[in-house]
Image (spheres, rainbow, N blue to C red):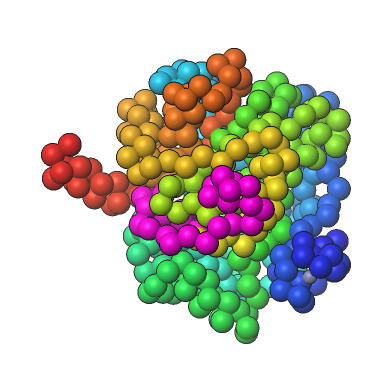
Amino acid sequence: MLVCEHCAASYPTEKPRWRCDCGGTLMLESPARFDLAALRERASNLWPNLWRYADALPVPIADAVTLGEGATPLLPLAGAWGDAHFKLDFMMPTGSFKDRGSAVMVSQLKRWGLTEIIENSSGNAGVSVAAYCARANIDAHIFVPAHASIGKTAQIALHGARLSPIQGTREDVTAAALNAAQATFYAGHSWSPYFIHGVKTLAFELWEQLEFRAPDAVIVPVGNGSLVLGCCLGFNELRNAGMIDRLPCLIAVQAARCAPLARAWQQWMDVPVPVNKENTMAEGIAIAAPIKGRAILAAVRETNGLFVTVAESEIFNALKIMAKIGLYIEPTSAVAPAALIKLREQGEIDPAASVVVELTGSGLKSSEKISEMLGAEVAGGT
Ligand SMILES: [Zn+2]
């Protein structure tokens, strides 16, 4: 059942739908079961991917459109941040955590019999949706900002998607996509209730990799909030099934230059604060008006979590620290370790707490931008 988060209208899942008739976002109510014995035994003959949680997914495994996503490493690392586990979600088929969401979302698009869809993304989600649509033999038309990384747009084009670069803001890109969606089904990942159900497998994997326990805190970047909402959903499903007894704190990180949710948090508001977006190296989370802002703020509150903002210098510093221990992540991903370093310095995390840092995207797609950042640093004499 698809249920409107605004007016509570409900719709069956048999027909394609991406929003309520009232314009509200939809959530998907779907049962989740966990077979602990099967997971422990790993008796299944499946590849170790996220479909091992098929009992908790809204798409039957027989209909799965998969590229082998999920089951990414969880690496314990000590450093300037103390002890923490780093979830290497950049080691996905298309180089970002978005593959969790795309696998489930595109599987449903295929079940609906769609042969053509529209999506809009600054890069990683567009890449991911293009790849899974290629796998599913669905024509994808992806709208991206004209300034998106060439490493991402080249990949989208090579997967066979039609690419429409749009001048202007991220919001202009969304408007162009929605306009085109009057004729073709809109599969925007920020709207899709199925996408969140794919992302929630991050929570399941952390639980399984930590010996079937939830960590004390999970640090994630937040723009449109699929990681916050996916983790909140996933850990809630585990709790409701009796697999864990409490939710981990979700620590949501925004770039200080575009922080509508963190500003709302500081002001005790339950909707995003309008901001004038400035240019940030964390382009993947530079969302001035997140569609599900109210739900994201509520999710962080529900988990006793918090919002953190990080400055450009802190993001760049964390990017370099991670690279120097061998992890080449993209600048957007670096906001999470930057937040951990900051919170540890401020003594805001219990030294004994088990903390997971989600590393969302590979640096390989952003090498051109990283190279520019290094060049600017040298030119600046720092
Ligand atoms: Zn509605």
Tell me the residue at 59%/57% (across/down): 272
Tell me the residue at 69%/31% (across/down): 248
Quarter of the image with the N terminus is: bottom right
191 over 246 or under it: above or below: below
Q: Quadrant of ligand 1?
A: bottom right
On the picture, is 200 further left or further right than 252?
right
Tell me the residue at 72%/24% (across/down): 213
Decide whether the magenta segment is chiefly helix, strand or loop. Answer: loop
Residue farthest toward the front in the current orientation of the protein: 267
Residue 264: in magenta span: yes
On the picture, is 153 further left or further right than 62?
left
Q: Magenta segment range?
A: 262-287
Does residue 67 appear in the picture of this structure?
no
On the picture, is 197 further left or further right than 179?
right
Quarter of the image with the C terminus is: top left
Tell me the residue at 51%/39% (across/down): 308
On the picture, is 334 further left or further right than 243?
left
Residue farthest toward the top in the current orientation of the protein: 352
Using the image as rendered, state which of residue 77 and residue 274 is in the foreground.
274
Horizontal and vertical percent position of residue 154: 38, 62
Horizontal and vertical percent position of residue 310: 43, 41
